[in-house]
Amino acid sequence: MDATITYETQQIWTSWFAVYLYLGGLGAATLTVTFLTDMYLRPYKELVLWGAFSGIVMLGAGSGLLFLHLLDHMAAIHVMNPLVLFEKPDAWIAWGTQFISWMMIWGFIYAFPYMVESDFLRGLPILGWVLGRPWVMFLAAHAGNHFRRTIGWLATINGIGVAVYTGLVLQSFPAVTLWHNPGVPLLFTASAFSTALAYLLLVLHLVMNREEDHPIRVIYERIDLILISTELVILFSFFTYLQSGSESGYRSAELLWGDLGWLIGFIGFGLLVPFFLQLKGVIWRWPSRYPIVASAVLVLCGGYLLRHYFMGAAVFAYPG
Amino acid sequence: MTRYVMVIDLNTCVGCNACMAACAIENQTPVWKSVWRTYVHDTEIGTGEDVHRRFFPSLCNHCANPPCMTVCPTGATYQREDGIVMVDDALCMGCQACALACPYRARYSATYEDIEIGRRFYGALMRDRPSVDKCNFCAHRVDAGQEPACVETCVGSARMFGDLDDPNDRISQLVKSGIARPLLPHLGTRPHVYYIDDLKRS
């Protein structure tokens, strides 16, 4: 049927949803990277506490933002029930809600033994009293000694799930060419872990600032460099993919690559500048920590810009 | 098995909008914010004296593979055996994913504020919870053996409603003949609202 087509950008999930996707991916990947570091590089109490708490706060803030935008807040109870996955295994928001919820739970449990050991947390008024109870200390020691890796991997699986979900949720909308393709989950997963590494580099450089962390920082920088390169390759694929095939995609390409915020802000300062800063650091080393700090800040800003523009450049082709 | 479909003949739609009014009253849609379950688009096609005015009714296409149902995280959007795609207000949390998934712009939000306004506008209101609503082919009328309100009120008989699985039904014959065709079939949604083109008259 030949119908007149109207092309429109969507106005339903706007910047607030970009923040939700950003905080979800960043928070979950931060927890995952922190726990993998603690399990396989070296036990690192302070990093786990920083990663776990900031990750849980990010996931909570992002989920809170989505919750605030629901039309019926009470009905959200249906998607909080884990059994929803048996009733709606095809709905990515159901999976995402479960991944986020369990990520926060396992993240908290993983950090729990370190919380009991933390002088700062035990000095806090109410929390300190709770952490000092004998049965709490027994539980923490039991979890830390016997189930640390099991809990760590449960958190890791859920963390990867959240990062992938942030892309899959957009991929499930068939009317938008920019979203409905397998590149979106790959791009958003790479971006989530890249921003998480950038965030943890900031923590290591500005909060910890210890010489013995150098091997961890080098590994983070190298992995981040690979992830930024991956993002650039995926974005180039998107550029060529959107050039032909559908009018919706072509208009999305016009919106993205015709916008200086996307071109210079995201691709330029959010990817290329950090790429070269980190490449130089990996090959020749920087004499100061500040180029890597600057690179990490730019990666974090770029991560948000990616999602902001992806939400804004979604073009629907409505018949009518 | 019954499979309800609608066929819309664009050659006989006169753009009176009676279907919109009948639907709004029947289903108490929030018309105060210009939101309708069915909407008649009015477009001029052509240039100079060779202009054709097209009235194009749109509504939920009751897809056999509905993306709005797939993305719904609570199961609020579901499909009956007869193919009608329904919304359960009690389950809908209003994330609006269905509105983004629908390629036909058939979903709209009914908020708590709309419920308050609706009570004053319509008197008694059937709805007591917000949801992301849509056309349901007037399922309550269909179950009672009646046609959807928009079909019954159509003065040009442009809207026809019937059973695709009944070979004797004129609707199924129109669809099988290929004269009536769906919108955006390339998306794989398998829509069950079909249109007879008005621009191919000799």
Image: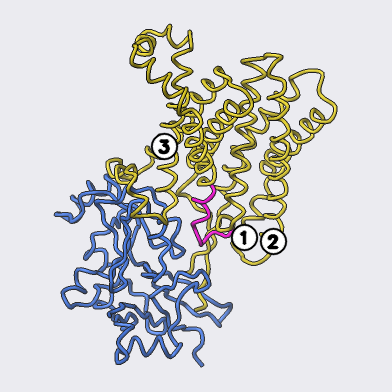
Residue where numbered disc 1 is placed: A249
Q: Is residue A247 above or below residue B199?
A: above
The outermost residue toward the right is A284
Q: Which of B58 and A210 lies nearest the eye of the viewer?
A: A210
Mark number displayed over residue A102: 3
Identify the disc placed on residue A280: none
Residue A130, horizontal then vertical, whole percent: 34, 13
Compute the Cα span from label 3 to label 2: 40 Å
Crowding near the residue tagged with mark 2, few <14, some 14–19, many ≥20 C-alpha atoms within 10 Å: some
Label 2–label 1 contact, CB within 8 A: yes
Amino acid on which the number 2 mark rests in the picture: Gln
Instruction: Answer yes or no: are tags 2 and 1 on the same subunit.
Output: yes
Q: Of label 3 and label 1, which has the lower sequence position?
A: 3
Relative to A201, is A173 above or below? below
Which residue is the site of mark 2? A243
Mark 2 → mark 1, Cα distance in angstroms: 7 Å
